[in-house]
Image (cartoon, rainbow, N blue to C red):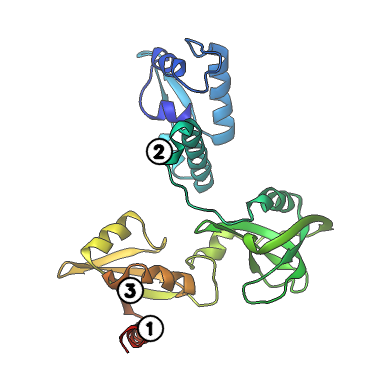
């Protein structure tokens, strides 16, 4: 219903026609029932804070706060997820024509973690890190969840290191269960601020000013999909564009720069420039000797 009305100003007759041809119209109703329409409208505002209004003089419906929808990240993410789910549900007959990206395991723990954060109860789980040959058990006070490149992560303080915030990938969790052990959520913790100077999930480097030079092709891509929230476009020279970031040069950020190949060149800081020089020399030695 949100997608339908967001597509344009629709009269009640327009909505009825679309409902008559909708796959969710199980009873093959010719009109969208008035009582159901207003119930959905009220529930949409309550759940998503999306206000569907009616222009009485011209007799059409519209979304009043359409510009605000993109402002709230969680609400936008949820709406997009539901829209994709709706699209896939309606496209069952052409399922072979739609290709999906595999999602690692771990999503089955999301509701458990959300409940633990809300109830302020610690979690007990078995974890097998990529850096360890053996799995181990730990108890965690969960603070927040983060998704990055189709992988989910939980951030929290383990009972063995209660003053250290650590990050665990859910696809490396082997078993998880709730506990009755309560914890106090820190008043000064802000999930967005915790990750704001970083790209991805690694936090093993200090944020610094980074300047890159991008070709015209990559510059267009970066304007559409910025590498980081701190991205600033500085200037242009001989068709190339310079961008500035305040971000930590972590493994995740460096890997993202690498995906652009020679279309992106690091200009500052000098340590990062030297790192890419060394990497380029290693690649040359690997393939040319």
Q: Which residue is mark 2?
A: 67
Callout 3: SS = strand
Would you say residue 230 is visible in this rendering?
Answer: yes
Q: Which residue is mark 3?
A: 211
At 52% from the left and 23% from the top, the residue drawn is: 24
At 44% from the left and 46% from the top, the residue drawn is: 99
Is residue 7 left or right of 163 when viewed as pictured? left
The residue carrying pointer 3 sits among few (fewer than 14), some (14 to 19) or many (20 or more) residues within 10 Å by Cα, namely many
Closer to us: mark 3 or mark 1?
1
Is residue 126 left or right of 252 when viewed as pictured? right
Q: Which residue is mark 1?
A: 279
Closer to us: mark 1 or mark 2?
1
Tell me: residue 60, above or below residue 175: above
Location of residue 202 by image quarter: bottom right
The residue carrying pointer 2 sits among few (fewer than 14), some (14 to 19) or many (20 or more) residues within 10 Å by Cα, namely few
Callout 1: SS = helix
Q: 128 or 17: nearer the eye?
A: 128
Tell me: residue 251, above or below residue 115: below
Question: x, y (%) of residue 221?
Answer: 30, 58
Q: Earlier in the sequence, mark 1 or mark 2?
A: 2
């Amino acid at each position: 219903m949100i997608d339908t009305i967001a597509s344009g100003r629709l009269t009640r007759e327009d909505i009825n026609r679309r409902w008559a041809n909708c796959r969710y119209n199980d009873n093959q109703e010719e009109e969208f029932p008035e009582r159901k329409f207003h119930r959905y409208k009220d529930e949409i505002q309550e759940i998503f804070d999306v206000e569907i209004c009616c222009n009485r003089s011209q007799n059409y419906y519209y979304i009043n706060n359409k510009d605000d929808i993109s402002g709230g990240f969680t609400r936008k993410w949820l709406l997009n997820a539901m829209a994709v789910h709706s699209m896939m549900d309606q496209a069952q007959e052409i399922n072979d024509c739609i290709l999906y990206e595999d999602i690692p395991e771990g999503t089955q723990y999301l509701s458990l973690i959300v409940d633990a954060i809300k109830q302020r109860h610690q979690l007990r789980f078995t974890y097998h890190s990529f850096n360890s040959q053996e799995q181990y058990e730990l108890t965690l006070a969960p603070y927040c969840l983060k998704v990055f490149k189709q992988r989910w992560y939980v951030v929290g303080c383990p009972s063995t290191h209660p003053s250290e915030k650590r990050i665990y990938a859910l696809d490396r969790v082997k078993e998880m269960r709730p506990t009755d052990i309560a914890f106090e959520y820190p008043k000064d913790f802000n999930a967005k601020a915790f990750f704001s100077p970083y790209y991805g999930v690694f936090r093993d480097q200090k944020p610094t000013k980074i300047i890159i030079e991008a070709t015209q092709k990559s510059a267009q891509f970066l304007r559409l999909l910025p590498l980081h929230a701190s991205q600033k476009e500085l200037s242009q020279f001989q068709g190339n564009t310079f961008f500035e970031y305040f971000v930590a040069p972590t493994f995740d950020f460096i890997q993202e720069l690498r995906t652009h190949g020679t279309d992106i060149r690091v200009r500052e800081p000098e340590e990062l420039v030297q790192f890419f020089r060394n990497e380029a020399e290693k690649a040359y030695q690997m393939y040319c000797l």
